[in-house]
Image (spheres, rainbow, N blue to C red):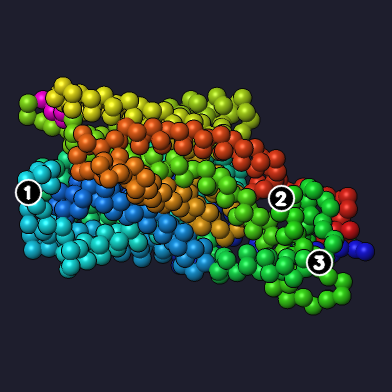
């Protein structure tokens, strides 16, 4: 019996690899005027300013929550990790809105102003004493500090989560909108895509570096109200930069809900679960004649994957039902899109532990630095939160070196445009990050022994190695993950799949909160408090917590090797193949026989 496949000639399934784009007014774009690096540079600008604003708040937030709002140390750490986790979780919402209804440009405009309003509210609260608890020294056991509650607490969390909503919805769209400026149908522009991802990470590092040095120093010297106000100013500058490039952007036409086609695939596959016929061609299972009936060999652009083959039944046209609706018969592109979503989940899950380690560098490591000698000279002290600038100082140098020298060298060796393929790049980072926690555990053990046993305070520079190693690992994992997810996406899902990168951050920070609470519960006894139960690191066992994370990270690396190999067995998933002609097993109407 012949097995016919539904044609993919509908307008909504047209390729977005450069053939279909519009300007900000909804008119067709001009390749000579729109897109390319001249457009992407404005997106890099908003990315640098936005990360500058949010990093200055997030990386020093634990100091404000602990010292000004008077929440206990473990609760303060959880507030920070929950805040950052919420930012990255909301990136899925931002990606969905962008791909389905608003487009990346208008999503960034709307939620950019939401984020700006949150920064302004934080600055107002930090400035007005009546919106904060009375001043108190949380480190002094003799003082009983009043924890923020009622209206003060409500005001704080409204401002904080306004920032989270705006930043979360912007993040995936900044990356995806910039990448959309390089059409894959143009070989010269497509080759620049990997360069753009490295440039985006350089922009990220520059913003982080300024936030962790200049803005954090201002927060320390002039107060958190001035610091939050400078974050608001940086965000406003970013929005100006974004709007300034409106006339140069390539924009994708809206496709409607991106989840509806995925739901249709599962419904159609379930309805046809008893059908025993599945496509047997392992290379190309669907061709399109683009709506033109001809005896010519059709052009094939959709590759077929051998994973989750039960979903293939969704695109098989039943002989006894000639007029099947969209919930019983799907296109091959829709089926492959669904397979991609399922296939990337294990890769996504393997990066969660990596981001749990990042959470420690923004919370406990900052408090760790607060317990060390931060004097650079008699008159200058290093703000503990500025220690997080160490990896970005290194990366400001390493990222250009990687792009200018390492990538061209690796291109000759691997014959891949990106030099190192994204999966390999992710794996290198996941391996290196283990040693960040090993260094952190060793240094914390030394700091604690010196403080408790000898009464000496060691230099804050002792914790530099853990930040340096993490920065190196992040250069591989973060950029590799963003490039991996963007390249796997089919039409209309670039922002959403890019958002999965940030969702990994979210899960990592939430897992950190769970681990802190769980460790405290497990290690607490009737006579001793838990590893992280005290507000004094000299009484806590932060070093043991770091060793636990090192072990989990190493186990996670071996887990990643398994899933990366599983994913690579079907390399066709997510790849956009060169246009080829297939004569075997294909009739003149694009039907598989």
Residue 161 location, x and y as percent? 30, 61
Q: Give the labeled residue for mark 1.
A: 143
Question: Is residue 429 at least partly visible in the picture?
Answer: no
Dot 3 or dot 2, earlier in sequence: 3
Distance between mark 3 and mark 1 Cα atoms:
71 Å
Q: Secondary structure at mark 1?
A: loop
Q: Secondary structure at mark 2?
A: loop
Q: Quadrant of the C terminus?
A: bottom right
The residue shown at (29%, 35%) is: 541
Residues 366 and 481: in front is 366
Q: Closer to the observer: label 3 or label 1?
A: 1
Q: Give the labeled residue for mark 3.
A: 274
Distance between mark 3 and mark 2 Cα atoms:
19 Å
> Horizontal placement of 451 versus 22: left or right?
left
Q: Which residues are magenta?
A: 373-377
Q: Are marks 3 and 1 in contact (CB under 8 Å)?
A: no
Question: Is residue 269 at least partly visible in the picture?
Answer: yes
The residue shown at (73%, 76%) is: 325
> Horizontal placement of 167 versus 119: left or right?
right
Q: Give the labeled residue for mark 2.
A: 307
Q: Quadrant of the N terminus?
A: bottom right
Dot 1 or dot 2, earlier in sequence: 1
The residue shown at (46%, 37%) is: 552
**Residue 184 versus residue 556 in the image, above or below:** below
């Amino acid at each position: 019996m012949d097995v016919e496949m539904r044609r993919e000639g509908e307008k909504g399934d047209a390729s977005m690899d450069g053939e279909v784009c519009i300007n900000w007014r909804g008119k067709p774009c001009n390749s000579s005027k729109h897109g390319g690096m001249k457009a992407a540079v404005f997106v890099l600008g908003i990315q640098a300013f936005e990360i500058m604003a949010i990093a200055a708040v997030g990386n020093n937030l634990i100091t404000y929550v602990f010292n000004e709002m008077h929440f206990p140390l473990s609760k303060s750490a959880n507030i920070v990790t929950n805040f950052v986790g919420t930012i990255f979780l909301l990136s899925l919402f931002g990606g969905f809105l962008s791909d389905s209804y608003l487009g990346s440009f208008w999503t960034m405009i709307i939620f950019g102003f939401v984020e700006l309003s949150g920064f302004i509210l934080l600055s107002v609260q930090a400035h007005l004493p009546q919106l904060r608890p009375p001043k108190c020294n949380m480190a002094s056991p003799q003082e009983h500090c009043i924890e923020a509650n009622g209206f003060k607490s409500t005001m704080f969390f409204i401002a904080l989560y306004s920032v989270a909503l705006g930043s979360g919805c912007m993040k995936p769209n900044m990356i995806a909108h910039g990448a959309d400026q390089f059409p894959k149908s143009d070989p010269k522009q497509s080759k620049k895509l990997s360069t753009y991802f490295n440039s985006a990470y350089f922009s990220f590092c520059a913003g982080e570096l300024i936030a962790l040095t200049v803005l954090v120093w201002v927060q320390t010297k002039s107060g958190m109200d001035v610091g939050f106000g400078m974050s608001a100013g940086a965000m406003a500058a970013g929005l100006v930069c974004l709007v300034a490039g409106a006339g140069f952007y390539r924009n994708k036409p809206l496709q409607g809900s991106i989840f509806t086609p995925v739901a249709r695939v599962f419904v159609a596959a379930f309805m046809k679960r008893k059908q025993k016929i599945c496509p047997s061609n392992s290379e190309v299972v669907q061709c399109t004649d683009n709506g033109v009936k001809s005896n010519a060999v059709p052009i094939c652009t959709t590759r077929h994957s051998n994973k989750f083959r039960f979903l293939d039944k969704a695109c098989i046209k039943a002989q006894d039902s000639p007029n099947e609706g969209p919930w019983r018969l799907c296109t091959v592109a829709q089926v492959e899109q669904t397979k991609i979503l399922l296939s990337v989940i294990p890769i996504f899950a393997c990066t969660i532990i990596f981001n749990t380690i990042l959470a420690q560098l923004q919370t406990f490591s900052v408090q760790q630095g607060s317990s060390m000698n931060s004097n650079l000279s008699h008159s200058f002290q290093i703000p503990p939160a500025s220690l997080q600038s160490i990896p970005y100082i290194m990366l400001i140098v390493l990222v250009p070196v990687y792009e200018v020298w390492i990538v061209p060298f690796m291109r000759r060796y691997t014959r891949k445009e990106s030099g190192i393929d994204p999966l390999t790049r992710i794996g290198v980072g996941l391996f290196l990050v283990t040693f960040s926690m090993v260094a952190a555990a060793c240094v914390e053990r030394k700091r604690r022994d010196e403080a408790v046993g000898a009464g000496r305070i060691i230099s804050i520079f002792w914790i530099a190695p853990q930040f340096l190693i993490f920065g190196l690992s992040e250069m591989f994992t973060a950029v590799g993950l963003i490039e991996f997810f963007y390249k796997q996406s089919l039409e209309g899902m670039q922002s959403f799949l890019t958002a999965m990168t940030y969702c990994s951050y979210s899960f990592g920070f939430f897992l950190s909160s769970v681990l802190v609470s769980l460790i405290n519960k497990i290690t607490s006894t009737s006579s001793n408090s838990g590893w992280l139960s005290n507000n004094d690191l000299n009484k806590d066992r932060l070093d043991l917590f770091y060793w636990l994370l090192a072990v989990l990270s190493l186990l996670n690396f071996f887990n990643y090797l398994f899933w990366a190999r599983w994913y690579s067995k079907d390399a066709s998933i997510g790849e956009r193949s060169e246009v080829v002609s297939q004569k075997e097993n294909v009739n003149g109407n694009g039907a598989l026989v």
